[in-house]
């Protein structure tokens, strides 16, 4: 058996593509995940998530023997931590997964090994893990290379962006930074930017907080325009004709494991300083609640006019168009909220990017549009943009599907 060079802890939306990409470059990768089904699926050369080109990369890497999955780590030269970092109650960051993953590989560490956190983390997490490692293995103090390198990829284009996007790499010392830079040069063609670990951690949080603030402005405009009887889509299109204005498109909120989560990592640690960032989170969360209320109002109007409950199609559950990722999805929240308030109504839940859901019975989008009285567009999936809708249907468009 070939010697393992890289161990990746976490084989999800980032960990698996990263593992496959490294393996495609002829580097022996041992991927670790706590889910046995995920492990078995990968070892068959298959994938458990939807991501273009990932299936080819995994099949090829497994077939050639450069990628293997397991539930336990092994000894290697480089260890990548690519596990989730959710938040606890009151939106406090939870780094317990990072800590558990680190604890798992501590027995295998040896002098000059490279340990990298890719998981989105609060400022100071890399240093905390360094201290944790050296407390457990004091003989290795200052003899390891420890760094932080956040991913910055777009679901639906991950395999391309992992290669061509620039990366920010920050070590706990200069030696660690250089070692990490050398590692990423093996498979990244984008520019590599060296810094320190704390700045790299903050860079990731800053990128997503910036996006959240920009989306909040668009969502706030949509709320104002609804009251002012103005078409927000037309307004933004006209405002963007200004050479120095570039307003984003509003939606039904903000989702995903990055933009909807990362700003809280800053707000939690720096509540007095992060006024705009915190308010943006409030605006984007409120937009989802507002959408749910608009649906309820429209249903009530229909019932009063026609003397019966409407059939309602909720179009989309993913957090963004054309993917299967439902994490922190505002569309999923809206569906849950609407159904909670009316268990007796007839609903068609549509999500073309997944086969089934453990809570909702899914309906084909064509059938849903044909049978529904009220059609609610929550996510701008490509299938919805091409759909034919009769003029007698009531349409609530929260994502600019027909604009």
Image (cartoon, rainbow, N blue to C red):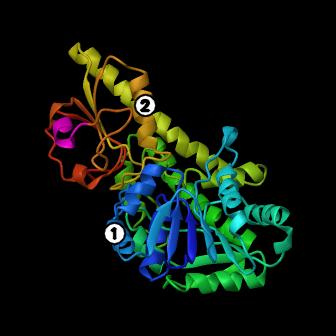
Residue 291 appears in the figure: no
Corner quadrant of residue 117: bottom right
**Of callouts 2 and 1, which one flags the residue occurring earlier in the amino acid sequence?**
1
Q: Which residue is mark 1?
A: 59
Residue 333 is inside the magenta segment: no
In the image, which residues are magenta?
363-369
> Up-down: is 294 above or below 318?
above
Q: Residue furthest top?
A: 307
Q: Which residue is mark 2?
A: 336
Q: Position of residue 7 (x, y in %)?
A: 57, 69
Across the whole image, how many numbered discs are drawn on residues?
A: 2
Q: As drawn, is 330 to the left or to the right of 401?
A: right
Residue drawn at x 56%, y 66% is 8
Q: Element at badge 2?
A: helix
Q: Residues within 10 Å of mark 1 (few under 14, many from 20)?
A: some
Q: Which one is in front, 49 or 321?
A: 49
Q: Which one is in front, 31 or 80?
A: 31
Q: Position of residue 267 (x, y in %)?
A: 71, 51
Main SS, magenta region, reads: helix
Q: Residues within 10 Å of mark 2 (few under 14, many from 20)?
A: some
Residue drawn at x 71%, y 58% is 103
Mark number displayed over residue 43: none
Q: Position of residue 273 (x, y in %)?
A: 77, 54
């Amino acid at each position: 058996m070939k010697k393992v060079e890289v161990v990746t802890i976490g084989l999800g939306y980032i960990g698996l593509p990263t593992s496959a990409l490294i393996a495609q470059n002829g580097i022996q990768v041992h991927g670790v995940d706590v889910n046995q089904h995920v492990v078995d699926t990968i070892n068959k050369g298959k994938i458990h998530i939807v991501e273009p080109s990932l299936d080819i990369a995994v099949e090829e890497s497994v077939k050639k023997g450069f990628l293997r999955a397991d539930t336990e780590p092994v000894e290697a030269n480089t260890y990548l931590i690519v596990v989730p970092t959710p938040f606890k109650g009151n939106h406090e960051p939870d780094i317990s997964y990072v800590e558990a993953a680190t604890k798992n590989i501590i027995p295998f560490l040896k002098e000059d090994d490279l340990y990298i956190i890719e998981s989105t983390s609060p400022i100071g997490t890399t240093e905390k893990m360094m201290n944790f490692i050296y407390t457990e293995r004091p003989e290795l103090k200052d003899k390891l290379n420890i760094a932080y390198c956040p991913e910055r990829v777009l679901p639906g284009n991950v395999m391309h962006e992992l290669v061509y996007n620039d990366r920010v790499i920050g070590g706990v010392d200069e030696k660690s930074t250089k070692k990490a830079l050398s590692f990423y040069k093996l498979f990244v063609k984008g520019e590599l930017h060296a810094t320190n670990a704390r700045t790299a951690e903050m860079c990731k949080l800053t990128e997503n907080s910036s996006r959240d603030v920009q989306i909040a402005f668009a969502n706030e405009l949509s709320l104002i325009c609804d009251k002012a009887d103005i078409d927000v889509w037309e307004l933004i299109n006209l405002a963007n004709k200004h050479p120095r204005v570039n307003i984003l498109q509003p939606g039904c909120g903000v989702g995903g494991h990055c933009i909807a989560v990362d700003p809280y990592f800053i707000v939690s640690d720096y509540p007095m300083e992060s006024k705009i960032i915190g308010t943006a989170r409030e605006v984007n969360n409120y937009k989802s609640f507002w959408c749910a209320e608009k649906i309820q109002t429209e249903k009530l109007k229909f019932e009063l006019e026609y003397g019966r409950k409407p059939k309602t199609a909720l179009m989309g559950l993913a957090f963004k168009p054309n993917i299967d990722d439902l994490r922190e999805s505002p569309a999923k929240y809206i569906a849950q909220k609407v159904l909670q308030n009316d268990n007796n109504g007839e609903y068609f839940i549509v999500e073309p990017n997944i086969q089934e859901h453990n809570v909702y019975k899914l309906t084909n989008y064509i059938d849903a549009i044909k049978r529904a009285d009220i059609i609610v567009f929550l996510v701008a999936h490509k299938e919805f943009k091409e759909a034919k809708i009769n003029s007698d249907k009531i349409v609530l468009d929260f994502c600019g599907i027909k604009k």
